[in-house]
Every structure is written in C-alpha cells, then in structure tokens.
Amino acid sequence: MSIRTRFAPSPTGYLHIGGVRTALFNWLLARGQGGQFILRIDDTDRERHVDQAVEKILDGFRWIGIDWDEGPEVGGPFGPYYQSERQDLYRNAAQKLVESGRVYRDYSTDAERAAEKAAAEKAKRAYRFRKPAYSDADLARFEAEARPYALRFQVPLGRTLVLNDAIKGPVNFDTDEIGDFVIVRPDGAPLYNFASAVDDVAMRITHVVRAEEHLSNTFPQLLVLEALGAAPPVFAHIPYVAEPGSRAKMSKRKLEEYEKQGVLVYLHQYIERGYLPEALMNYLSRLGWSFDAAQEIFTRAELIEKFTLDRVNSSPASHDQDKLFWIEGEWMKTIPLERKAAGCIPYLRQAGLVGDALTADQDARLEAVITALGDRLKVFSDILKLGRFFFSEQVEYDPDAVKKRLRKDGVDAMLGDLAGLLRDAECFETAPLEQAVHAYAERAGRKMGDVVNALRVAVTGQGVGPGLYDCLVILGRETCLARIEKARALLAASKA
RNA sequence: GGCCCCGUCGUCUAGCCAGGUCUAGGACACAUGCCUUUCACGCAUGCAACACGGGUUCGAAUCCCGUCGGGGUCACCA
C-alpha cells in the first residue's frame, strides 16, 4: 500500500515557517515514496476562523511548490476536506463510541470545572476530569430538563500506552495521566483529538508527521483509534522551531520584537521580499534534517529523493535568517536572466518606476542592470535597493558617500575634466571608457580609486554598486553628464 | 507541580543506535589576508562546541544514573 501523509492547518491566520516546514516534511515523504499528500482544513472551531486564511495558505503552498493530491480545490475520493463539512462522520463515530460504552455524557457546568481546575492548580497537581458518579435520578432529571452535555471519552486506567515514534523512538505513557477528554462539545462540534483521529482513519492516512507539541496528544488519539477498532498510523513528531540565537520556542507574542530585529517568521513575508521558492524550501528542509555531513544545497528533486524521517533531528532547531539568506544567494546565482527580470518587475512597478507594460527600452535596460548587478542581487526586492538610480530621473546622494568621495580638494575640477572626457568619448562602451579614465588618472597624477569612486558617487549617488563602466554605459552619456553637473552643484551649494 | 520530549561551535549540523579512526568534521555568521575602482562574488587562514557531576570500561561525545537547563502537555483551542 502506498503511503499517505497530510498537513492539517487550522485557518486562523498566516502560514508560519514552522508550519511550512511540517507540511514540507509530509510532502517530501509522500513524494519520495510515490504516495499521496493530502491537505485538510481543520476548521472545527468556527470562532477562531479567519476569513481568507485558507486562500492565503493555499497560495503559500503553491508558491513554494508544495502541491497536494487531495484537498481544497482539487477534491479527492475521501472528501470533503474541510472538517466543518464532515459533521456526519464525527457524529456517527461518536455514536459508535457511545454505544460501545467508551464515551459518556458529561453534564458538568463551566463553573464546576473551573472550580476544580483552580483547586488542582492551588494544590499543584494536574487537573484530570473523571466520570462523575451520576445517580439514575440525576440522569433522568438532566434528560428531562434537556440539560446540555458534552461527550467524554472514558479513559481506561492502569494501562501503559506505547508509541513508537518514527523520530523520537519508543515513548511510554501511563493512561492514569490522561483525564477523560471531551470529544464532542454540547453544541455538537467535535474536538481536535477526536476529529483528527477519525479523519486520519477515514482518509487512510498512513504517516502523521506533525509538530512535537502534539506528542502528548497522541495518547488520547491512540485511545480513540483503539476504540474505533482502527490500526494507528505511523507517528513522527518533529521538534519545534526556536527563535533566532536561542533554544526558546518562537512565540506569537514576540512577533513585534522579531520584526524589530528584522527577523521574518511568516511565509508571506519572504514572498514579499522576493525570495526564491527553491531557496526557502532548501533552507526549511535543512532545519532539523540533514542528509550527510557536507551537503547544504539541495534541489527539489534531490530533497524528494533523499529525505527520510530517520534523519530528522529530535532536538529543536532555531531559525537562522543569515543562513537562509546565504542559501538564497546560492540559488539566485543559478537563476537565468529572464526569470530574474520577471522577478524584479513587480518591485519596479510598485515603486512607480515602470508602467504596467515595459517599453522595449526599459526591458533592455532592466536586463543590462540585472547583468551588471550580478551576484549582488540576492532577493528580487534588491532591484530597488541596488538599482533604483538606473530607472529614476532622481538621484539620491548618500551623505556618507558624498563625504567620503566627493567632499575633497580638487574633486570638483576633476569632475569637470571627467565630464569633458565623457562628452568627447567617441565610443560610449565599457572598454574604451575604462581606457580613457585610466589615461586621465595617469595624466592628472591621481589614484585610480579616487577618480573612479568620485565618478561613481557623482553618477549613481551611491558609494557601492556594480562596476563603474557598466553604470556609465547603462545610464548613457546624457544622464551621466547631467548627474555630474548635479553633483558639482551640490558641492558648490554646500561650500557657499 | 505531575507526566512526556530534548541538550555537540553564537546558529544549522556530522559523529551517538552497533564505544577506539574525534588533539570532534562541514556550513552560516564573525575576523584577517588575497583578488579588486567600491560593494558583492571567489580563494586562503583564523575564532569557536561534546550542559554539569558520577558510574561502567584498557578506552565515553557515544552506554548507565543523577543534577541543571530548555520545551511540550495537563482546554468544551488546534
């Protein structure tokens, strides 16, 4: 039988990179063994449902290249794939458990349970719900007054459950540690530990790969599975993703703090910056998994071929944005020019630097700029940071660069000479321009670095960037001359 | 607090299950040098870890126990 894995997000917001990694491991496992990867939306709790969340999740998966064989939009033989649409299934399963005596009606009130919970906490002991000793008269009365009840699973005491986790190894758990848990709320809504187990059986899931926070949840689920007469799937619990530079788990509360430090934790943030999907997939795969002692860069096909559960680490990994950035750079080096151009255009458009459709000139210029930028372009949004001055009439002079390269004795006169040189250049191409500038530096007895850098700042406004002659040629003679004039005016103004 | 999981350079990790080849390897980051008109790239070098304490053994990062630290769970959330 071929394997079937699943990822079951609840539509409560954006996709966290930890969640994407979990989905990725499931997907890799299925793809590597010719099985199926299923997407199921765990939306049993309608109160927490966020509009558009499902669409955003699906878009995220599509972007990174995780495709699903069954699930939203594509359907499949075990649908529907929204838990909110599978109520009958849960009702039937619950009915079956009631009939077999594994589940009972719990008439307790919120206030009663809250009081017991508080007492347990005060006494520093774990709170565990156990079946109340209702008398027949009580039960008759509750029924007569149609008192609402939840359905609870009666946990068999004194047993030791054994889970053979594919990542953690064997884990023993005493059933005495598990309180009787609710499987269906008074309003009829099934709860996670129940719905998830029922769905995994119904959808013929063979491998459940999920975050380790579910490790303890597995035992109630094992009990449900057993009561349902179903064989448990293989479970694999992967460690959480820790925050950068620490072992502490990333927390939603600290989100603002991460933002301040420039750490991105949501998938859409990486998409917005213009990261490459293959880079993010590569990075995420290496977070908690390795193939051998050396390989860092993996193509999608290699990942599918080489991924196995037994090489997933059992200890937490912390998110390392620097490493992701490096992997991104490695991948960007492999991307052909046309794709880089296509990736950059949305940013130029957003900045109002190009229109909806590029003119032939703009198109040619964009390709020239990207070529000149070379490895400096790491993420697509860099086109704005590194190459804005190629597309805008405006030049913004970086004060530090101006101070370091232009505000020096003799620079103004030198720029005048250089302007003349550019004006008179017969052939406005990189090689001849380089020759001319070289000759000038020698004639004027100036260091090449001083000449070149002054000219760079004058025409680009920046102290760093692509090769100077590339810049000159792409900008064109007229623009270069105009900008040199502007730079000289700037110097004159500040001197006065 | 009970129970469960985890603990190798700052970070991602190899090695651990089947003890010696580990004066612990690779990568990111950082530092220095080379290349170079800047930056980026590339190349070279350097910095840096077996959480701690016992035990077993001729020998322990590897096996056992304890301590400490981190995390999860104990919801009518997922």
Image (tube, coloured by chain):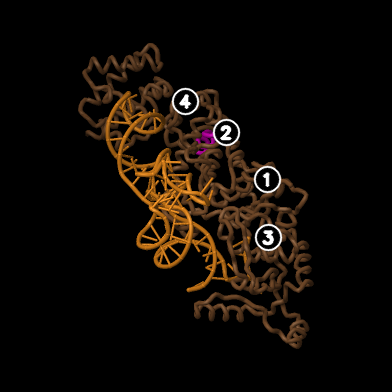
Chain colours: A brown, B orange
For marks 3 and 1, the one nearer the N-term is 1
- Give the amino acid type for the residue marked by disc 2 in the picture: Asp
For marks 2 and 4, the one nearer the N-term is 2
Which quadrant of the structure image shows residue A450? top left
The mark found on residue A68 in the picture is 1
The mark found on residue A119 in the picture is none
Q: Is residue A59 above or below residue A382?
A: below
Q: Residues within 10 Å of mark 3 (few under 14, many from 20)?
A: some
Residue identified by numbered label 3: A196
User: Badge 1 sits on which subunit?
Assistant: A
As rendered, which of A456 and A172 lies closer to the eye? A172
Residue B9 in percent (x, y) is at: 37, 48
As rendered, which of A410 and A227 lies closer to the eye? A227
Residues at marks 4 and 1 on the same chain? yes
Residue A349 lies within the magenta run = yes
Magenta stretch? A342-350
Residue name at image x 64 percent, y 52 percent: A7
Residue identified by numbered label 4: A371
The mark found on residue A356 in the picture is 2
- Give the amino acid type for the residue marked by disc 1 in the picture: Trp
Residues at marks 2 and 1 on the same chain? yes
User: Badge 2 sits on which subunit?
Assistant: A
- Give the amino acid type for the residue marked by disc 4 in the picture: Thr
Residue A254 lies within the magenta run = no
Q: Quadrant of the C terminus of chain A?
A: top left
Task: Kindly report the distance in space between the C-alpha atoms of the residues bearing marks 3 and 1.
Answer: 18 Å
Q: Are marks 3 and 4 in contact (CB under 8 Å)?
A: no
For marks 4 and 1, the one nearer the N-term is 1
Q: Residues within 10 Å of mark 4 (few under 14, many from 20)?
A: some
Task: Kindly report the distance in space between the C-alpha atoms of the residues bearing marks 2 and 4.
Answer: 22 Å
Q: Residues within 10 Å of mark 1 (few under 14, many from 20)?
A: many
Task: Kindly report the distance in space between the C-alpha atoms of the residues bearing marks 4 and 1.
Answer: 36 Å
